[in-house]
Image (cartoon, rainbow, N blue to C red):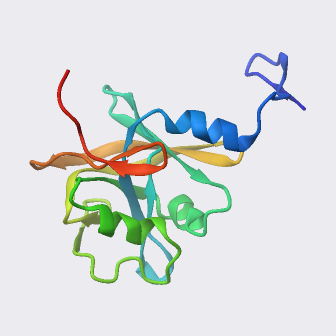
Amino acid sequence: MTAETMEGDVIDNTASFDTRELRDVLGIYATGVAVMTTIGEENAPVGMAANSFASVSLDPPLILWSIDLNAPSIDAFRNHGSFVVNIMGEDSKEETMNFARPSDDKFNNVDWSEGCMGAPILNNAIAFLDCKLENRITAGDHEILIGSVQQINQTDGNPLLFHSGKFQKLGSEL
C-alpha cells in the first residue's frame, strides 16, 4: 500500500504490525477525555466521547479533534457549523460513558445548556471550548475537525483521563 505526501512523494505504508498492536501502543499515551457535542437533525442534541483532542494555535485560537468516518453522528458535526469540546472531570465517568456507548438518547438525564454557537455545553464538564467549525480534513479512516474557539470556561476539578484502555485519575505530582 502506498500514499502520497503533501509534496507528492510516494511513501510505503506497509506496516509490520496489526491495528491491535498499534492501538495498544497508542493507548500508552495518557489523554484527557472530552465529550464533543453539536446539534443534529430537528435541532436534537448530539454527542460522543473522544480523546483525540489537541490544541493547534493560540493566535488565532484553534483546536482539533478527529471522528471516525463511520460514526453515526458525523453528519451532524459536519453540517451544524459548530461544536463544543466538553472536558470531563474525574467524577463524570458514568456521564461520559453515556456518550461512549451507542444510544438513541445520549442526553437522557444529562444537564446541559446552549453555548454561544448553539451546541450543548454539559453542566458537569470542568471546562468547555465552544467552537465554530473552520475546516475538515479526511485522514485515513477519520476526519479531523478544526474549530475556531469562540468561548471558553473552566471550573475546579481534576480531569478524567484515559490510559491503556481504562479511565484513570491524576496521580501524584513528580
Residue 127 horizontal/vertical position (percent) = 21, 50
Residue 81 horizontal/vertical position (percent) = 46, 58
Residue 136 horizontal/vertical position (percent) = 58, 45
Residue extending farthest to the right is 1
Q: What residue lies at 23% left-to-right and 48% top-to-bottom?
A: 151
Q: What residue lies at 43% left-to-right and 59% top-to-bottom?
A: 49
Q: What residue lies at 62% left-to-right and 47% top-to-bottom?
A: 143
User: Eyeballing the image, is 99 above or below 103?
Assistant: above
Instruction: Give the quarter of the figure containing the N terminus.
Output: top right
Q: 49 or 59, which lies in front?
A: 49
Instruction: Give the quarter of the figure containing the C terminus.
Output: top left
Q: 173 or 61, which lies in front?
A: 173
Residue extending farthest to the left is 156
Residue 80 horizontal/vertical position (percent) = 47, 64
Q: What residue lies at 70% left-to-right and 48% top-to-bottom?
A: 141
Task: Name which quarter of the figure residue 149 lies in.
Answer: top left
User: Eyeballing the image, is 110 above or below 134?
Assistant: below
Left or right of 82? Residue 22 is: right
Query: Can residue 71 be seen by looking at this rendering?
Result: yes
Q: 174 or 115, which lies in front?
A: 174
